[in-house]
Amino acid sequence: MKKITGLVMTLVALFTLAACGGGNDKTADSSSNAKSEDQLAAIKKAGVLKVATSADYAPFEFHTMVDGKDKIVGADIDLVNEVAKELGVKAEVSDMSFNTVLASLKEGKSDIAISAISATKERKEQFNFTDNYYNPPQVLIINKKNQDKLTDLAALKDKQVGAQKGSIQEDIVKSQIKDAKLVSIEKVPNMVVEVNSGSLDAMVVEKTIAESYVQQNPDLMIANIDLKPSKDEAFAIALPKGSDKLQTELNKIIKKLNDEGKIDEYVKQNHELAEKSAE
């Protein structure tokens, strides 16, 4: 899904260099590496896995009422809860703007970040990532009143096409719908409102996410326009750079869950929950 913008990445990098007192400080580098290597042991000792997410992306992470209380749920949340269970600890999930999810990880405020995050080349320079756990197709949501007009990518020339700010969907618009006018918006529900009202002509989002919002908004539909899939769009869990032991352990858990079909099951169950919550 999602991708930190160049500006944010630059600021994070500058902050990190300043905090370390410069890139040539071998003592600081050694200390940082040791901290990362010990992260798995530290998590187990603390008994808590601190998780950063942006809970506005049903069915992967979203808010719903459970027993009269607001709760963060979703396929990603089910996944980290299972990860925490396998590690013998409790998951502590913090909700924040997507633009700050990876920054939170970089600053040591969270142990892992999961928010339908794609492990792009740029991100891999700053963070470790687990193996991919889910690879969704990308689609365009449009207003039904425009279905006869917006039939192919060429029809989107000079049109306002939305993508979540800091997300990989911004790159999809730039690379595959080059003649469109990219409109970056922080929250997906806000984009949905704008497509409904007509201030946006279309928006790019993962198919499962799109299905949930279309179900909730009868005036919207998934356009019959194909977008090219990419491995860069698959989801992975982000970890601090150098956290190899934690990465290895999480990869084992992810493989186990995928082999058992659990992650597909999480997506399906939470898609149904999101639809029910919208009724």
Image: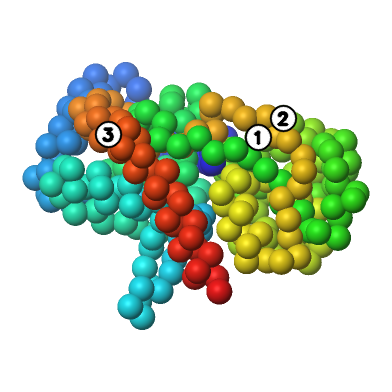
**Mark nearer the viewer, 2 or 3:** 3
Q: Residue under label 1, please give it.
A: 171
**Which amino acid type corresponds to the residue marked 2 in the rendered image?**
Ser
Front in this rendered view, residue 230 or 214: 214
Q: Which circle's residue, 1 or 3, is located before the other in the chain?
A: 1
**Which amino acid type corresponds to the residue marked 1 in the rendered image?**
Asp
* Residue 142 placement (x, y as % from top left): 77, 54
Contact? badges 2 and 1 (CB < 8 Å) = yes
**How far apart are the two marked residues, 1 and 3, measured between alpha carbons?**
32 Å
**Mark nearer the viewer, 1 or 3:** 3
Quarter in which the C terminus is drawn: bottom right
Badge number at residue 175: 2
Among the 4 quarters of the image, the one containing residue 95: bottom left
**Which amino acid type corresponds to the residue marked 3 in the rendered image?**
Lys
For the point 60% across and 46% down, which residue is it? Answer: 207
For the point 60% across and 38% down, which residue is it? Answer: 137
* Residue 238 placement (x, y as % from top left): 37, 37
Front in this rendered view, residue 70 or 75: 75
**Relative side of 35 to 95, left or right:** left
* Residue 132 placement (x, y as % from top left): 41, 31
For the point 35% across and 22% down, which residue is it? Answer: 23
Contact? badges 2 and 3 (CB < 8 Å) = no
**How far apart are the two marked residues, 2 and 3, measured between alpha carbons?**
35 Å
**Relative side of 81 to 60, left or right:** left
Question: Secondary structure beneath disc 3?
Answer: helix
